Amino acid sequence: MIRKLFFAVLLLMGVSPAFAGRAPAVSEGAAAPDFDLTARKGKASLAALHGKVVYVDFWASWCGPCAKSFPWLKAMHEQYAAKGLVIVAINLDKKREKADEFLATHPAPFTVAFDPDGKTAEAYRVAGMPSSYLIDASGKIVLVHAGFDPKDAAALEARIKEECSK
Amino acid sequence: MLLASGLPAAARAGTNGTTQIDASTLFYGEQGRVKVLEPMARITRIYPNGQSISAQLGIDVISGASPSGATPAGVMQTTTSASGTVTTVSPDQIPVTDFQDLRGSLDVDWKKPFGIFTPAVGGHFSREKDYQSVGGNVTLSADLMQKLTTVTVGVGMNHDSTFPVNGISTGLTVPIQTGGGDDSRPGDAIAEGPSESGSTNPSSSPKKVINVLAGVSRVLTRRWMLGAHVTRTLEDGYLTEPYKVLSVLDAAGFTVKQLTEKRPDTRNRTSILGTTVYHLSSDVLYGSYRFYQDDWDLRSNTVDLKWRHELEDNRFFMPHLRYYKQTESSFFRSNLVDGQPLPEFATSDYRLGPLETVTVGGTYGFHFMEYPGEWTIRAEYMAQIGDSHPDEATGVQREFDLYPTQNIGSIVVGYSIAF
Amino acid sequence: MLQVMTRRRILSLWFVLAALAFASGCAGAFKVHPWDRDLLAEKKMSYSPDPVLMAIDDHIYFSKEGSTGGMGAAGGGCGCN
């Protein structure tokens, strides 16, 4: 009986790292890490976008919620690009063909950049797929969001609108 | 009923959810014994919020003969029925009982994710001529470490009832003979009520089954997943096979009489299963090992390996190998011996005896032209090897092969579509 | 005596399971980033992706062998003999 308890505790310890704090995504208020990635046309660099409101979205072709977020991203681009919003959707697929297949069926009129090695994702300490970061004109992160649920879309849009009107 | 654990399915649901249909039909045949036709279909609806509901319907058409548990007669036997049919049975032929059955089953499942927790509830109902099973189960999964680890716990309960044609005998007694004509055998007639042949036991005997499951599924690397699951089952009630018998032999190996078998009325089972899935550049390897033991002293080890080899055009070929070995239960007897005191429990059912099963097969998956959905065809050969010359065999029985290797073939045709 | 032997075996299996879980929990080498889940997202990356086939196999082996259990097809009982 005691031995069974011992092994149960051991098993629990094995899973307990789950409950330990994990490194959170780069937090709100911090400076957004710079990136300089290949995009569909030319390059995408955060430094070059200083002064604009930037919405960085990390996505991949195999991620279900990412597929759901693209129509919303398209709508945000159409409504707020004129007001200074720049959307940079950073793709994390290991193979470019997978990303291209996805983009063929999910229209993306905004900037799409490629980070196959995940270096930028690591810099932003992406904790879930998709992950989005709203960066203000001074290069500071004002919003971090993981996952995508149509229910959260309204709140996200409100923040974007707020930043764009500054 | 599925009390299943593992990583939650990647919710690739579109804005309006996904409907998935899986259907498979089994064509199964044992050389000279049982033949089964089993179509089964499942429909699953996954909603955008991750909630899923599914219903699975199955039909089993079974016919053929299975060993009654008795030993070969030892002498040539010729019987002529009233209708003039002459049957000759050779001395070493293992007695079998003919039967036919039709079984229907329905399983329903519901699950919904709430943050990191996913509760699930399932129900099961199945019915055949002389057996009914009703059950339910509840599971709870938790996704930890950003879904790298999934822990599942679950509990299920089943209430089964047996109502054999001739009622339930007390066990280790002379079998009740059917009152019908020469061509009637147990399993042919349709039970319409309590037996008239003097059995004082109720004609329906229940059995309760409680299952507890705990499992962990763990992503180790980008390509590699491990799983460990433990299941404990407690069965309580009527656990004897109503149609199985044991032969009581004399020293020369001839049958003095037959007795019905008798098993304990509780059974405690434990099963520990380890699984591994490894993704190569495009192929996937699957492996599992299961250790099982129960308080009837039956122990078994099972190893199962599959290699899914991807081909062009979305096709695949997956060879499969399974090896199973069990040791006999404490009250397994290939036969009883006349004059010796009766044991408390005894069975000649080969499924509780020493047994090895080897399965070799392969699955071919493909899409049919431009039509949607994926087809799979699986062909498998199974060999069951038992103890041909048990120690308990006496006299003439020692010359016979009391457990010839059983050859079994099966084909499963499957179809899956999601929309 | 046979009883003690098998209990020890079960306990040693528990130990192996626990040790495995523990080791994998600690091993920093096994770092799987959220964006490294591409392969894991595939339907075939599940030990038993087809529940209908699993039910058919469980039924076959339950009818032909003395053992039950695995990932937990919790006894859809049958008098399949």
Image: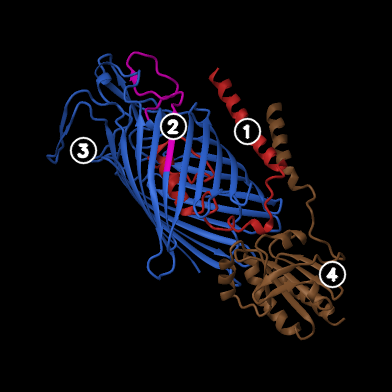
Q: Which mark is residue B325?
A: 2
Q: CA distance from mark 2 to mark 4?
A: 62 Å
Q: CA distance from mark 3 to mark 2?
A: 39 Å
Chain A palette colour? brown
* Range covered by the magenta-colored residues: B321-349
**Quadrant into which the N terminus of chain A falls:** top right
Is residue B324 magenta-colored?
yes
Side of B163 where B74 appears, left or right:
left
Residue B133 pos. (x, y %) = 47, 46
Prevailing secondary structure class for the magenta stretch in the rendered image: loop
Mark 2 or mark 4, whichever is nearer to me: 4
**In the rendered structure, the residue with mark 1 lies on which chain?**
C
Can the viewer see residue B44 in this picture?
Answer: yes
Q: Nearer the viewer, residue B17 or B303?
A: B303
Q: Mark 2 vs mark 1: same chain?
A: no
Which chain is rendered blue in the image? Answer: B
Chain C palette colour? red
Amino acid marked by disc 4? Val
Amino acid marked by disc 2? Lys
Amino acid marked by disc 3? Asp
The residue tagged 1 is C16
Q: Is residue B2 above or below residue B84?
A: below
Residue C64 pos. (x, y %) = 39, 38
Res A103 → quadrant = bottom right
Q: Which mark is residue B182?
A: 3
**In the rendered structure, the residue with mark 2 lies on which chain?**
B
Q: Which mark is residue A142?
A: 4
Q: Residue lying at the far front in this picture: please name it.
A: A42
